[in-house]
């Protein structure tokens, strides 16, 4: 976890700032407009124009790909900002400079600078019958102000949701990256992949470059149309670049990638799963295009060093041994499918037990169906969020998919984890536990087990 400040006065002030930010409307309570964020940015002198931006959207893989791009840029000698969401333990994780979460001192100092401007915009909105700025909107303001003050050479920015009206979109990315698009957040983004793709395509700005994962044909067409509309160049996985070789390795995988400017081999990526290999290709090409316009090959040794340093907490992360306990932030069917495939490829457990807690607004049935082939038993529970699905309801869904004999219903997460360990070890050594269903579920277990790294 991000360490607390050592100075008691700073710690107290940080707690006040965090309370003020957390007291705003949550990030899932959205009004689709950039007006309030743009107004604050203008009053602050548009800090988001003082650095270059690589902007990412998609349904799954955004955070991991963001962290890969940032690591590669840093390895190439650039001073970096990184903005990701949601956080595991502390909102400071979302705003990183040179790979480290923003310090408490800098966060407090920056908040004291921007808060009066936010109050002006809040008052204007209230006078027009509108809401205050949301939790996510003010975090974006904070991030862009921190990056401008640092100053950073490049900010690698993950959207919160969608793209077109996401608060991060007040910045214009030189490179836009779109990870695989699937159904998620339907109450905000639309009920079809085409509607969702239209929203996410909004981060592709005039004259920019798009790097996209392999997509559904309809999604690919929408992204291509957006590029044509704004005069952006488009580079697509499996067309313009690809993972050409991939081998499972101890602690991760070994990749060969054909980029747009050259080939790169013997890349060790300390993350598991085919999906992370695909994310690595996106990241590499994004940096090729950002640094050299795709016209010159990057130094392979620098590329290897950058990827070797990548971490992605909460993404198929080993948090304990004997038995092995993994956490994964999969929170939709697409993510659960990728998790199930990666588990089968990277681990060999005599008995694998899942601990699952899912938000009530997610497609729990489809997620459990995706996980079922990979799990011998599942323990359903709740996480610490009030959005967590009722455990009895989740148990009924799970029983219909796994069969009642393969399901345990345990309301408290610590007890559920203990039950899962017991079941995993019930037939001797070699069992494992994977905890999944949401970022909150992964974070709760990391906290329970005392995992500090982010």
Image (tube, rainbow, N blue to C red):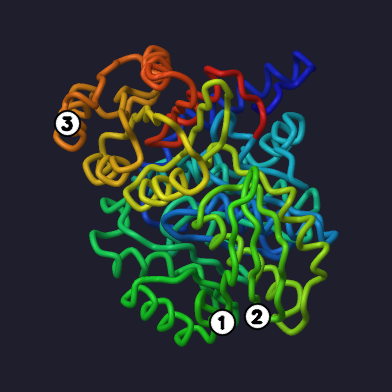
In this picture, residue 36 sits left or right of residue 51: left
Q: Vertical placement of 240 versus 423: above or below?
A: below
- Mark 1 crowdedness (10 Å alpha carbons): few <14, some 14-19, many ≥20: some
* Alpha carbons under labels 3 and 1: distance apart: 45 Å
Of label 2 and label 3, which has the lower sequence position?
A: 2
Q: Vertical placement of 283 versus 242: above or below?
A: above
Q: Secondary structure at mark 1?
A: loop
Of label 3 and label 1, which has the lower sequence position?
A: 1
* Quarter of the image where the C terminus is located: top right
Disc number for residue 260: 2
User: Where is residue 235 shown, x and y percent of the image?
Assistant: 55, 79
Count the marks: 3
Q: Secondary structure at mark 2?
A: loop
**Residue occupying the far front of the picture:** 428
Pointer 1 residue: 240
Of label 2 and label 1, which has the lower sequence position?
A: 1
Task: State which mark lies toward you, 2 or 3.
Answer: 3
Res 154 → quadrant? bottom right
Q: Nearer the viewer, residue 354 or 137?
A: 354
Q: Nearer the viewer, residue 76 or 126?
A: 76
User: Where is residue 444 shown, x and y percent of the image?
Assistant: 48, 24
Pointer 3 residue: 403
* Alpha carbons under labels 2 and 1: distance apart: 6 Å
Q: Nearer the viewer, residue 217 or 145?
A: 217
User: Where is residue 38 shown, x and y percent of the image?
Assistant: 54, 58
Q: Vertical placement of 314 versus 83: above or below?
A: above
Marks 2,1: beta carbons within 8 A: yes
- Look at 32% across and 53% down and name the residue there: 184
């Amino acid at each position: 976890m991000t360490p607390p400040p050592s100075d008691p006065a700073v710690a107290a002030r940080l707690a006040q700032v965090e309370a003020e930010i957390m007291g705003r409307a949550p990030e899932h309570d959205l009004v689709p407009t950039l007006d309030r964020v743009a107004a604050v940015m203008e009053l602050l002198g548009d800090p988001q124009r003082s650095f270059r931006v690589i902007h990412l959207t998609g349904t799954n893989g955004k955070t991991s790909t963001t962290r890969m791009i940032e690591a590669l840029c840093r390895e190439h000698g650039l001073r970096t900002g990184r903005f990701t969401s949601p956080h595991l333990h502390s909102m400071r994780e979302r705003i990183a400079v040179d790979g480290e979460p923003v310090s408490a001192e800098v966060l407090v100092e920056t908040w004291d600078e921007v808060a009066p401007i936010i109050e002006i915009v809040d008052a204007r909105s209230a006078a027009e019958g509108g809401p205050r700025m949301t939790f996510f909107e003010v975090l974006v303001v904070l991030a862009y102000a921190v990056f401008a003050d640092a100053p950073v050479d490049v900010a690698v920015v993950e959207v919160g949701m969608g793209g077109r009206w996401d608060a991060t979109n007040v910045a214009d990315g030189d490179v836009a990256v779109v990870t695989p698009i699937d159904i998620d957040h339907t109450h905000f983004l639309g009920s079809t992949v085409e509607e969702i793709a239209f929203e996410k395509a909004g981060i592709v700005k005039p004259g920019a470059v798009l790097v996209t994962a392999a997509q559904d044909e309809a999604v690919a067409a929408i992204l291509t149309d957006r590029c044509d509309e704004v005069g952006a160049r488009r580079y697509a996985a499996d067309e313009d670049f690809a993972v050409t070789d991939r081998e499972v390795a101890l602690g991760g995988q070994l990749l060969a990638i054909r980029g747009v400017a050259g080939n790169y081999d013997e890349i060790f990526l300390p993350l598991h799963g085919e999906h992370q290999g695909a994310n690595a290709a996106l990241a590499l090409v994004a940096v090729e295009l950002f640094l050299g316009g795709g016209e010159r090959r990057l130094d392979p040794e620098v590329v290897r060093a950058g990827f070797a340093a990548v971490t992605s907490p909460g993404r198929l992360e080993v948090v304990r041994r004997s038995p092995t306990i993994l956490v994964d932030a999969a929170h939709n069917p697409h993510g659960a499918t990728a998790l199930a495939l990666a588990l089968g490829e990277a681990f060999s457990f005599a008995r694998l037990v899942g601990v699952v807690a899912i938000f009530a607004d997610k497609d729990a049935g489809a997620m459990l169906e995706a996980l079922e082939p990979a799990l011998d038993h599942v323990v359903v529970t709740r996480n610490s969020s009030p959005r967590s699905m009722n455990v009895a309801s989740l148990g009924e869904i799970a029983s219909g998919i796994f069969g009642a004999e393969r399901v345990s219903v345990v309301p408290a997460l610590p007890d559920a984890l203990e039950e899962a360990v017991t079941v995993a070890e019930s037939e001797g050594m070699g069992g494992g536990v994977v905890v999944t269903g949401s970022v909150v579920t992964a974070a709760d277990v990391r906290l329970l087990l005392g995992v500090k790294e982010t």
